[in-house]
Amino acid sequence: MITQIYSIQTVQEALDCIAAGADRIGLAIDTGVKLPNQVSIDKAKEIFDAIGDKAKKVLICVTDSEEQLYDPVVYLKPDVIHICGYDYYATREFVKRIKELVDGIEVLQAIGIIDESSIEQASYYSEFVDMLILDSVDKNINGIGAAGFTNDWDIDALIVKQAKCRVILAGGLSPENVKEAILKVRPWGVDSFTKTSDILPDGSSVKNIEKVKAFIQNAKEAFALINE
């Protein structure tokens, strides 16, 4: 059972989240599509180098072509590549090639929870990716996720039961609702971006470490309950 915190923009944010108990740290770079809280590839390298083996490093990518992913992934060597665009989803061929290029990397495919059709989509991708992340969809945002509201936990729970890979639950999870979500959905992990961040006047955000601590503590309590 893991906790995953997105979208990190500085070394200090990463280290503070790890100190708070985060198992995975995620950041986004520009691979052709603008995402909230993107960092430059050099900043991503600085953050990943500082993390080292203290936590798993997740690279968030939105693209319309897998060819845009290979060079940054080889350079940054994340533990996980998170594919979350509307136009490009991981393929069996991509999974095979990226694992040849970066030893030990895992592929995390985002599934936007729209309605019950998302169950079939999730089942398909669970056949060949390492993990799914179930997230909310806001078409005003370029990638699946970062919407700030919850999706249908009943659908999420069905996906978790049927999936052939590990499943991370995302979508508007907060310190206040993460325990309820885990007890209902029973995912392998949970993810937070918007509800553990503070919004700045310019619309950007920074991590609120106290919220991160509360989120992780409540998640761990819930995971302990379902594993009793």
Image (tube, rainbow, N blue to C red):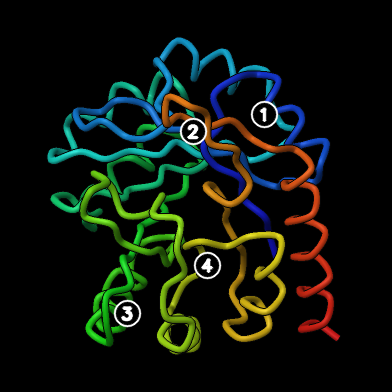
Q: Residue 211: x and y, percent?
A: 73, 47
Amino acid on which disc 3 is placed: Ser
Q: Are marks 3 and 4 in contact (CB under 8 Å)?
A: no
Q: Residues within 10 Å of mark 2 (few under 14, many from 20)?
A: many
Q: Residue 208: x and y, percent?
A: 69, 38
Of the two numbered discs 2 and 3 on the same chain, state the one appearing first in sequence. Answer: 2
Of the two numbered discs 4 and 2 on the same chain, state the one appearing first in sequence. Answer: 2
Of the two numbered discs 1 and 2 on the same chain, state the one appearing first in sequence. Answer: 1
**Residue 116 or 77: which is nearer the viewer?**
116
Residue denoted by label 1: 14
Q: Are marks 1 and 3 in contact (CB under 8 Å)?
A: no
**SS assignment at label 4:** strand
> What separation in Å lies between label 2 and label 3 (alpha carbons)?
26 Å
Amino acid on which disc 4 is placed: Leu
Residue denoted by label 2: 27
**SS assignment at label 1:** helix
Q: Residue at x 38, y 24 (%)?
A: 74
Of the two numbered discs 4 and 1 on the same chain, state the one appearing first in sequence. Answer: 1
Above or below: residue 225 compared with residue 188: below
**SS assignment at label 3:** helix
Q: Residues within 10 Å of mark 4 (few under 14, many from 20)?
A: many
Of the two numbered discs 1 and 3 on the same chain, state the one appearing first in sequence. Answer: 1
Side (left or right) of 26 relative to 63: right
Q: Residue at x 17, y 49 (%)?
A: 88
Q: Residue at x 86, y 86 (%)?
A: 228
**SS assignment at label 2:** strand
The image quadrant where one finds the N terminus is bottom right
Q: Residue at x 26, y 40 (%)?
A: 62
Residue denoted by label 3: 123
Residue denoted by label 4: 169
Of the two numbered discs 3 and 4 on the same chain, state the one appearing first in sequence. Answer: 3
